Amino acid sequence: MARHIFRPTRYHNTLGTAEPCLRIADGDTLVAETVDASGLDANEVAVAARPNPMTGPFFVEGAEPGDTLAVEIIRLTPNRRTGWTYSPLALTVLDPAAILDRPKQERAIWEINANEGTVRLRDAPAALAGFTPPLAPMIGCFGVAPAGGEAISTATSGAHGGNMDYRRFAPGTTAWFPVSVPGALFYLGDGHAAQGDGEITGTGIETSFEMEVRLSVLKRRITWPRAETAEEIITIGNARPLDQALQHATTEMQRWLGEDYGLDARAASHLMGMVVRYDVGNVFNPAYTVACRVAKKWLTKA
Amino acid sequence: MARHIFRPTRYHNTLGTAEPCLRIADGDTLVAETVDASGLDANEVAVAARPNPMTGPFFVEGAEPGDTLAVEIIRLTPNRRTGWTYSPLALTVLDPAAILDRPKQERAIWEINANEGTVRLRDAPAALAGFTPPLAPMIGCFGVAPAGGEAISTATSGAHGGNMDYRRFAPGTTAWFPVSVPGALFYLGDGHAAQGDGEITGTGIETSFEMEVRLSVLKRRITWPRAETAEEIITIGNARPLDQALQHATTEMQRWLGEDYGLDARAASHLMGMVVRYDVGNVFNPAYTVACRVAKKWLTKA
Amino acid sequence: MARHIFRPTRYHNTLGTAEPCLRIADGDTLVAETVDASGLDANEVAVAARPNPMTGPFFVEGAEPGDTLAVEIIRLTPNRRTGWTYSPLALTVLDPAAILDRPKQERAIWEINANEGTVRLRDAPAALAGFTPPLAPMIGCFGVAPAGGEAISTATSGAHGGNMDYRRFAPGTTAWFPVSVPGALFYLGDGHAAQGDGEITGTGIETSFEMEVRLSVLKRRITWPRAETAEEIITIGNARPLDQALQHATTEMQRWLGEDYGLDARAASHLMGMVVRYDVGNVFNPAYTVACRVAKKWLTKA
Amino acid sequence: MARHIFRPTRYHNTLGTAEPCLRIADGDTLVAETVDASGLDANEVAVAARPNPMTGPFFVEGAEPGDTLAVEIIRLTPNRRTGWTYSPLALTVLDPAAILDRPKQERAIWEINANEGTVRLRDAPAALAGFTPPLAPMIGCFGVAPAGGEAISTATSGAHGGNMDYRRFAPGTTAWFPVSVPGALFYLGDGHAAQGDGEITGTGIETSFEMEVRLSVLKRRITWPRAETAEEIITIGNARPLDQALQHATTEMQRWLGEDYGLDARAASHLMGMVVRYDVGNVFNPAYTVACRVAKKWLTKA
């Protein structure tokens, strides 16, 4: 199984059927550079257009419609020393009456300290002088070419993945996407150095990355993205409103518990009713993201 | 500061202005029995009507409209050996297409093992034979008389609290409610022996309790319920859809960070954008509940 | 059947179980004065508190829980020469990004010309100099005491009716409400001299009225409010988001077509699929209102 | 100005940048055949794949990004004698609890009587024996290539138009779309012989058509689709939930009243607050459609 080092020369603002940038084998590892959400590369040079320019698409040999592409996130290394965010809180997360008092949107710079494993707001106000949350890299936007010949903007997301901006898409997580075209056509980019739940300022700390992932083909069918960590299985719904995203994620989890863990709809509800956890991935993009999580300690493979 | 032991003889299905069952002083502790969501008491005798019959209301001396009532949850002790849940998953959490395949709603019995600190489904299917999640008591419905002379069903929730069914309303948490009437008129009940996020079967493990809480009056004004644990501050929004519940919780957190921690709207967004956490309290009741959490380690009192 | 002239001396800001202001017989007619949404009477004297102070409750002899109260709207006569509205558009009807450019909320006065049957904005800008839309009186808030001992704010609505702000609640329409308490306990008020769809400024032309209605008890059960005009049958859903209000209204129409017109679910869908009409009653109040309409010309009583 | 007769040989399931099927001049008229939503042509032969195969794209000379394409709907002539619908009511319009009693989805055939100007359900149940609503042709799906290189499924809609399923897109209406690519790249199809509000069975009467439209380029910029009839101006929002679709439509109407009729935000709200009308275009597709209408009689060109 090979390890490919890939430096892109062109970028994509949609996930769709485009000319592959590279063909790799099932099980290969990919080390790929990605630019930030606004197209700035490691040297802060603008090399691509908004929104969320993607590296890819990678053609994975053997992936066929109806299969699943597993993306093991091995390493996410910011390749410059700063990233940027917006402030204040996004329009989507405020009581409409509070929008009237909202300050103007501005861009702020954050310093990334890889040695310390922290990030820090440059020119922080006094009240945030000591605020150095952990460096916690994640992939904001990744996924595969959608079904039906669509080319879907990297601003949004769907069953194919896309701009989910969910903080658990981080090293240690393996994400699954439903394959709709031969070769899957995998894209990735929009890395964040850190981000809370919901991407509630409309950004994480947006920066450029070297991302290392391993791509494998599973001969099984899924409906919505799934993910796995050492401790949990996770399903993802992408839609508006949040209620509908949650419905997709919950229904997909019920399916998974049936397929792999021998739980019918009633048994799945007994288990989920006690131990399910929900995360709000993002509540900013055109489609919102909700994750549904179940700890593996409660599960036994059927 | 006194400790009152209270055994109710009548129950309430709305939170409103009713004759107090007891008058207590600011800072007093209350040990109160509560029945389950369907009105069954410690002996499984039906003593009250659905939904969520409440113990109360308690008049807290000194509480005036515009104040805040702090409810320290000291202890929640189930006072019988079983509780019940519904299955399968609620209509509100399923993709509508999945509702067509949903099995019929049934009531199941769970055994509560206080010594082991676990719960266990009675007559569990083989796949759940080893499923003994922790006993994790929480208050499903509590709050104060609402403003404007309303009497709001214990089926739902609002700015006054009510049926939020949020699992972190548990021992170690202090909940805050906005006082709208003299004496606050505090109600509590609908205890759950355990529940995951979202109350996604429409129930936690519904059982009767002895609940111990300490009630204090804060001379400050809040808009939505708040809560505090040793590690976190939490705000609550109650509304449909989830998006709106999240907006209320987020806006209230922004207010709190301004009031107590010296963060203006822009600074609050920088901090929340990195470290905020959301929980889905319930996604079943007429009003859904979203909690917004910030760890205290990121905060300094202004 | 008697005709009662009623002038209120007290008002209500909730619909609930309160002392009746008058007991009338099934089939009696009621001529009642109502104040405007802010409590101003015919002399523009403030006699009641916000929101939407109600005249009532009227106890209708023979009305029992499970029955339906029919309210024939005979006449709505503004009893002063002006009313008021807010501008600009409400927060709920604007793209959040447009809220940032919204001018401050202001109150405007409208002149009511009963002879001409028009209304006119006082001190109108030049572009509205010739804007004299028709005087088209409607009832903003009316309904009955809800089930379960609730007292629901006149700011909002539900299965019991309430603040629906729907322009077809006008003379010529008979509205139906589900009776939940003995005597039904009917309330009315919040008259508007005119209003478009959606109550999108948060107001119609708010003014005081003499309202004439005839109240009758139907020995049948409904779930959501219904209405009838000479040409149409109408069902009402009250909820957030609009999607859910529409679901309630549509489901209630399907029920009605089955009960009275011999159409099963499939036949009802064939008919509704071709001829149904939806109105947005209000998209401003805590619960939104959607009306579902079917013309009687397509229907035959079963 | 030419009149082009076009018979397609290939169809599209996305609106995007594809090879034009024909280049026409600004102001030319187009007579184009379209197949039904499932790909059946005038002979009921399956010539294209679901969903909603489109005829096009037509390149309109002179149309540039930032312009507006006006589509005058001149004539919609069904070119076969039958169409089809689904029953019962769609999952999206039912109270979730009512989904449990919903009969299975079935396809029904409707006869189109062009002479009488009516449609009639074949093999109708007795209760619908006399149900012959008017033949009222409309375009279900039409629009232009979207911005940003997207190719958007004909199952859904957006700012570019698409599958709006709105019954006023009928002869006598001129629809406007925002141009995002050179030549606009106009698509049309998915004709319905008749449909009520909301497309609440998931279909209108789906059939093949000869459609005649006239395409003109306006050198002005719009954000969401607009339309004009002899009596009204109309704006369209496409999103979920309905609330958001309504917000887009309302905000676009406010813009239009400012651009063409001299009404600032406050004046626009005074006028709209009295006379606005909303239609629910569809409440079935991935994006719902709401139309906002203002009668021209209330307006004066600035």
Image (cartoon, coloured by chain):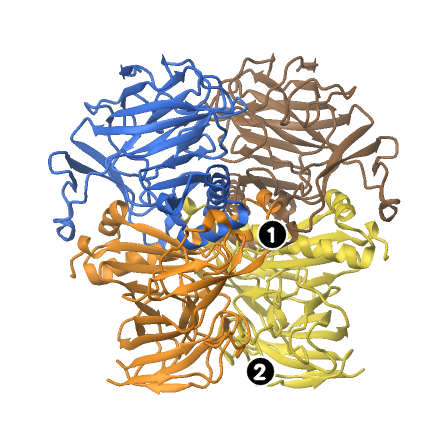
Chain colours: A brown, B yellow, C orange, D blue
Query: Relative to residue B198, is residue D64 drawn left or right?
Result: left
Q: Splitting the image into 4 quarters, where does residue D7 fall?
A: top left
* In front: label 1 or label 2: 1
Crowding near the residue tagged with mark 1, few <14, some 14–19, many ≥20 C-alpha atoms within 10 Å: many
- Give, as a three-letter code, the residue at label 2: Ala
Q: Amino acid at mark 1?
A: Pro
- According to the image, label 2 marks what residue? B18
Query: Which label is found at residue A96?
Result: 1
Horizontal side of D125 relative to B164 (left or right) equals left
Q: Nearer the viewer, residue A123 or A25?
A: A123
Image side of residue B231 versus residue A230, left or right: right
Residue A103, horizontal then vertical, whole percent: 72, 45
Q: Position of residue A274 (x, y in %)?
A: 59, 55
Quarter of the image where the N terminus of chain B is located = bottom right
What residue lies at 29% left-to-right and 35% top-to-bottom? Answer: D170
Q: Residue at x 64, y 18 (%)?
A: A28
